[in-house]
Image (cartoon, rainbow, N blue to C red):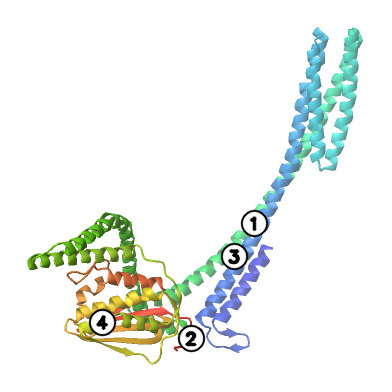
Amino acid sequence: MPLFFMHDFIYLSGKMEQTLQGVNVFGNYERPSLRSKLGLLLICLIVTTTVGAGLTLRYVYRTQSLFRQMQERDITGLVAAQGLQKELVAQKGFVTYFFLNGDPEWLADLEKHHEAFEGWLHKARESEYLDQGREVLNQIESAYLRFTHERSTVIELYQQGDRAKGAQRHWKVRDRFNDIYALCEQYKRLHEQSMARESERYRREARILTILSLTAMPLTIALALWLGYILFRRILDPLRRLAHGEGAAPNLSGEMGELQQRLSTLIDDVDEAHTMLQETRQQVAQAEKMALVGKLAAGVAHSIRNPLTSVKMRLFSLERSLNLSPVQQEDFEVISEEIRHLDTIIRNFLEFSRPPKLRMQRVSPSEVVDMTLQLLRHRLDSCGVEIRRDADSPLPEVDADPEQLKEVLVNLIVNACDAMQDGGLITIEETMGNVGGREHMAVITVSDNGPGIPPSVRDEIFRPFFSTKEEGTGLGLSIANRIMTEHGGWIHLKSSGRKGTTFLLALPHKETSQWHRS
């Protein structure tokens, strides 16, 4: 069987070599691709490994069967034979002891060993599988019945006081004992011989398995070395050259040549992914800081807001009851203004740390822009700020909380008004497009022509408590960022050159939904 096994693999290897060289008995073919070479090698390795593993499992199973047969049959029979001999020998002498002193305890002990002998005989019958073994057990049982019968007769004679006649028959009982012991020894040798035969079968199976393993191992090693050569020569070495910027090997072609052509595109994609990863890391850092702020919010609210409310009420009462001079009135207004500023800080702080639950509904972002501009109309007029809207059509409806989105837009527009102290222009652009690799996004762009945000602080503007205003809380953009994230979108600061600031708001939109403006 091993010779046929080796012959088949040698023949298969020869045919595979011809195929890899692109030649067979009928003529010349094109040179096979790298994929075909690797496929053929992998198939050969799988076949070799599968056949070897199957043969190994087959012989392991047969070996286990041999041991299981020895354990369940021969070893059990051998143990039973030893048990029979032990209990038979244990019965020897009790009748003699009874003859000497007439103590009935000897007969009680004899009965115990008699029952144990019969128990071992029953176990041997249950596990016996050899015809010769069953025949020996029948002989043991017949001889033991005669033995116990004659022994009972001897005991009765002794009990009746006829000691001479009992002693005469006692010698025949001893002969029966020797016959039974010899049969037990024969039964034991029978199973010892069976175990020896099974052991010889096991050794033969082990030799066959060793021969098969020695036959398949060189072939598997040869195929593995061949596969390793192709992997290192045709795949790993060109990849190493590309990774170190050495360029591909001069004779590189096929799939690896195409890989080299696409590598430049892949590098560009990696750079873009790296940029997005940096932004994600910044968002994670902000989330950690937000969690820390949330733990402090409750204590700050209870410790400051209640006393601050009492102070505001007392000041309001004093303002109505006191007749203040102009200087005192000015001081009073400064104190009131600072208290209002503190109240604003605490209110923003609480909103940041304990954001309200979103109340999602179908709404067009264009409607939210309308409500925001209506709310800030007087503020825009007083600051001398002009609003310009650029939208071909109203944005379709999205799932959003209009009040929360309005807060985001209010924050951006108020910041733009504060930055343009002498008035200016705010442009709001509403479009649909692809943002960040995601399609069907509703995009609102808010731009101003103010002084812009210095490059040195652009990475810090969404960080909690960071502000460039003297009286700012530093939480407005952080709250706006949190609101956009909860909506499944994002807010992004676009580079606008040296002058002006542009924020981009993006919200996910379901393509099937449409918005019709009345």
Q: Mark 4 Cα within 10 Å, few/some/many (few <14, many 20+)?
A: few
**Which residue occupies the foreground of this view, 55 or 158?**
158
Q: Mark 2 Cα within 10 Å, few/some/many (few <14, many 20+)?
A: few
What x and y, as percent, mark residue 490?
Answer: 36, 75
Q: Do the residues labelled 3 and 2 touch (CB within 8 Å)?
A: no
Q: Give me the C-alpha separation between circle 3 and circle 1.
A: 14 Å
Question: Mark 2 or mark 1, which is nearer the start of the sequence?
Answer: 1
Q: Element type at marker 1?
A: helix
Residue at the spot of label 2? 514
Above or below, 404 relative to 343: below
Question: Mark 2 or mark 4, which is nearer the start of the sequence?
Answer: 4
Label 1 vs label 2, nearer the camera: 2
Q: Do the residues labelled 3 and 1 touch (CB within 8 Å)?
A: no
Can you tell which mark lies on residue 49?
Answer: 3
Q: Do the residues labelled 4 and 3 touch (CB within 8 Å)?
A: no
Q: In which quarter of the image is the N terminus?
A: bottom right
Residue at the spot of label 1? 209
Q: Which amino acid does label 2 sit on?
A: Gln
| Residue with the most extreme bottom position | 392
Q: Element type at marker 2?
A: loop
Above or below, 482 relative to 362: above
Q: Give me the C-alpha separation between circle 3 and circle 2.
A: 60 Å
Residue at the spot of label 4? 378
Q: Which residue is drawn at 65% across and 52% down?
A: 206
Q: Give me the C-alpha separation between circle 4 and circle 2.
A: 33 Å
Q: Residue at x 15, y 67 (%)?
A: 333
Q: Which amino acid does label 3 sit on?
A: Thr
Q: Element type at marker 3?
A: helix
Label 3 vs label 1, nearer the camera: 3
Q: Which amino acid does label 1 sit on?
A: Leu
Q: Is residue 41 left or right of residue 256?
A: right
State the image quarter where residue 405 is shown.
Answer: bottom left
